[in-house]
Image: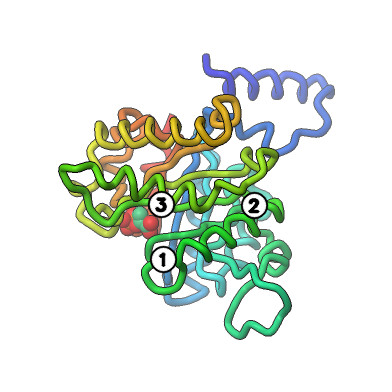
């Protein structure tokens, strides 16, 4: 029996006996709990559809196993999603980006306090689609530090554009991680999540997602890197996820053989039937 299952059983027994009073969400979400990030990107087109998607997932979430789902809608639908999941212990609200500069004269941006007041718990930073248009390594670092120091669980997205026989992708991933977290004080490491998302695997047909052995290798590499930076004990606190063309047909192999703590899902997270099947398939 794994630790988190054990813990939930003990918690249920104590609750039944009236002995368990305050349980923080983070205590329930143990290391073995799988994280699933639903990145809606610039979808859907209307608030009505946003409500329908999340209400349908929420309704079926009682069948979810040891997973925590983070829905990251566009800013304009944060409230729509929040209203529906507010009582859920399985589904949490995430933001796709954040602005971390001083003051308020930043037309078109959304800041830390606004995300807090909307009920956001997780923030994505450095997604490749944002790096391509707006965010360089300096900006990603500032967003990462700003977000994590403000108490958000922060998902740092990294990943190479392409792979070659010289293994240059290792350098690329190392540089992106080091640039963003070198100055991160150890006390925040527990709120760091790394999403490895090779750009060549995003938005592709499902058979072009990463191969599990390739993923396993890079996961070990990232863990080793984190261990060198923060020490082995702190490294254990960081969840490592994979993103890139995950579907209901390939998630199992990716998670189990790739040895990751969860997945970041783009397009498939908007196909409710497929997505729920995927989540229910995670043990
Ligand atoms: C993503 O948005 O980061 C992503 C992984 O998208 P997709 O699952 O559609 O490849």
Whereabouts is ligand 1, in terms of quadrant? bottom left
Q: Where is residue 152 in the image (x, y as percent from the top left)?
A: 65, 52
Looking at the image, residue 250 sits to the left or right of residue 104; the answer is: left
Read off the residue under disc 1. Answer: 131
Q: Position of residue 183 (x, y in %)?
A: 61, 48
Cα distance between the residues tagged 1 and 3 = 10 Å
Q: Which of marks 1 and 3 is nearer the N terminus?
A: 1
Tag 2 secondary structure: helix
Observer-nearest of 262 and 224? 224
Looking at the image, residue 15 sits to the left or right of residue 78; the answer is: right
Can residue 271 be seen here?
no
Q: Is mark 3 within 8 Å of ligand 1?
A: no
Q: Residue 158 carries which label?
A: 3
**Image vertical order of residue 128 relative to residue 89, above or below:** below
Observer-nearest of 149 and 49? 149
Q: Residue at x 66, y 65 (%)?
A: 115
Q: Which of marks 2 and 1 is nearer the N terminus?
A: 1
């Amino acid at each position: 029996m794994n630790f988190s299952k054990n813990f939930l059983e003990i918690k249920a027994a104590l609750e039944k006996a009236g002995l368990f009073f305050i349980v923080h969400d983070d205590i329930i979400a143990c290391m073995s709990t799988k994280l699933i990030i639903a990145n809606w990107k610039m979808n859907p087109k209307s608030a009505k559809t946003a409500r329908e998607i999340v209400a349908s997932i929420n309704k079926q979430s009682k069948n979810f196993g040891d997973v925590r789902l983070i829905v990251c809608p566009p800013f304009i639908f944060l409230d729509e999603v929040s209203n529906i999941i507010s009582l859920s212990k399985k589904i949490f609200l995430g933001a796709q980006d954040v602005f971390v500069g001083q003051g308020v004269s930043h037309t078109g941006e959304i800041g830390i306090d606004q995300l807090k007041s909307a009920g956001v718990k997780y923030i994505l930073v450095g997604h490749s689609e944002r790096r391509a248009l707006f965010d360089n390594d300096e900006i990603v670092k500032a967003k990462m530090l700003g977000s994590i120091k403000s108490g958000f669980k922060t998902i740092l997205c990294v990943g190479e554009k392409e792979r070659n026989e010289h293994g240059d992708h290792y350098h690329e991933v190392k540089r992106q991680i080091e640039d963003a977290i070198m100055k991160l004080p150890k006390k925040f490491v527990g709120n760091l999540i790394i999403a490895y998302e090779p750009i060549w695997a995003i938005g592709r047909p499902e058979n072009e997602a990463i191969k599990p052995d390739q993923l396993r290798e890079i996961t070990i590499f990232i863990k080793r890197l984190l261990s060198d930076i923060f020490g082995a004990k702190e490294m254990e606190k960081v969840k490592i996820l994979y993103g890139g063309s995950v579907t209901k047909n390939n998630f199992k192999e990716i998670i189990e053989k790739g040895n990751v703590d969860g997945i970041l899902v783009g397009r498939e997270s908007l196909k409710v039937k497929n997505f729920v099947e995927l989540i229910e398939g995670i043990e």
